[in-house]
Image: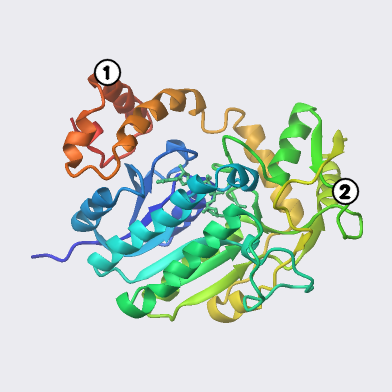
Amino acid sequence: MAKKEPYILVPGGAGYIGSHTVKLLINRGHNVLVLDNLSTGHVGAVDEKAKLIVGDVNNLHLLQKIFKKYNIVGVMNFAGKIIVPESVHNPITYFEENVNSVASLLRAMKQFNCQNFVFSSSASVYGTSDVEKITEDAPTHPESPYAFSKYSAENLIRFCERPYGIRHVIFRYFNVAGSYDTCEIGEAHPQETHLIPTTVINAINDTQMTIFGNDYNTPDKTCVRDYIHIMDLAEAHVKGMEYLLNGGSSQTINLGSENGYSNLQIVQTAQEVLKKQINFVFGPRREGDPAKIVASNAKAKEILNWEPTRDLETMIRSDFTWRQTHPKLYNDFEEKKVSQQDLQKVLKVRGAKNISKMYEEVELKQQEHLKDLYKQNKKFCGNKILSK
Ligand SMILES: NC(=O)c1ccc[n+]([C@@H]2O[C@H](COP(=O)([O-])OP(=O)(O)OC[C@H]3O[C@@H](n4cnc5c(N)ncnc54)[C@H](O)[C@@H]3O)[C@@H](O)[C@H]2O)c1
């Protein structure tokens, strides 16, 4: 029997970071299979050449079907929930979505002997740190349920190396911003909490924004963060996966620029870049926000021969251009409201033994709606709903 073509499975590949990485993986000649429940992702963000399966990464039966059908040689997982304050109020959901999902993926990888795993973790696992530049061996001190969920998933992945031979590159991202170099895709979270897009959106709309906290122990009393351009980050992921496919050993690697900017500096830089006055006020601190986090990226340079090349101005300008050229972003928020309800019905029966039965629970009318939505986007869907 002819050997099946190798695929990289990308859960969460319809989201912000996933979709940019998928595009680069495809440009590098990899076959990509995106698995996404579209809870915060967008069909329109997924590269035309990738296959898209609408489904939940927590659904082990679906994962087993995928691994059986395709020759998955590596998994790059971006799926998860990402809002720190929300995690403070819904810790169970954050552990279900960010840890259980990783357990399902690892279980399927073990069963089908897939040994290369790239994982999206976060600099929030370090918590507040006094060091100038945080290295990967710095003590970890997660300060929110979100950070704990990332830290727990990291450890689960590490535990799976010895018994199952699954090697990993765990990337700890600092703050990611900007859009694809061509500005054809960009950041479009349903609820935007990140500072650069929030600043740009307020600049475009002439609305008032809030800087959370001006009583931190930093030079201008606002939080200091390390910002990295999405394209630099996506390039590191491609290198990370190729490193594992070439037999590289497991690593935990920071992805940051080594440049710390305060919240106030971000707003001031945006004013200069966009040549516009931005209306802002100071608000109270957000729960779970450490004062300062800046990366050392020496390890990424050494192991992956990777270096960030795009600066803060480029991040702000590319985010602005993406929003100016795509005023409705992916244009699917309205449609998604309906299709999401349909999908939720499917997802509610997660773990059902009989997958085709589970999809049949979606009414025909709703199936038609989904069919149209995906036809419009000319994407492949491996989902039973669409194959009827
Ligand atoms: N954006 C940042 O600045 C940042 C910083 C540090 C770490 N991270 C990590 O990077 C990853 C990606 O972040 P992002 O900004 O692209 O977020 P995002 O919300 O844009 O992307 C997440 C994607 O995962 C999908 N998804 C969520 N739960 C799923 C599930 N159960 N099954 C299938 N698909 C599911 C969503 O629909 C979405 O497409 C996250 O794990 C996040 O913790 C992001």
Q: Residue at x 32, y 24 (%)?
A: 372
Which residue is more in the foreground, 77 or 60? 60
- The outermost residue toward the top is 365
Which residue is more in the foreground, 339 or 353? 353
Does residue 362 lie above or below 321 as drawn?
above
Q: Is residue 354 left or right of residue 98?
A: left
The amino acid sitting under disc 2 is Asn
Does residue 97 lie above or below 189 as drawn?
below
What residue did someone put label 2 on? 214
Q: How is the image coloured?
A: rainbow
The answer to whether any part of residue 276 appears in the image is no
Q: Residue at x 72, y 45 (%)?
A: 196
Q: How far across and down, in percent of the image, does residue 122 sit?
A: 59, 60
Q: Quadrant of the N terminus?
A: bottom left
Q: Residue at x 57, y 77 (%)?
A: 305
What residue did someone put label 1 on? 365
Q: How far across and down, in percent of the image, does residue 141 sit?
A: 66, 67
Q: Quadrant of the C terminus?
A: top left
Nearer to us: label 1 or label 2: 2
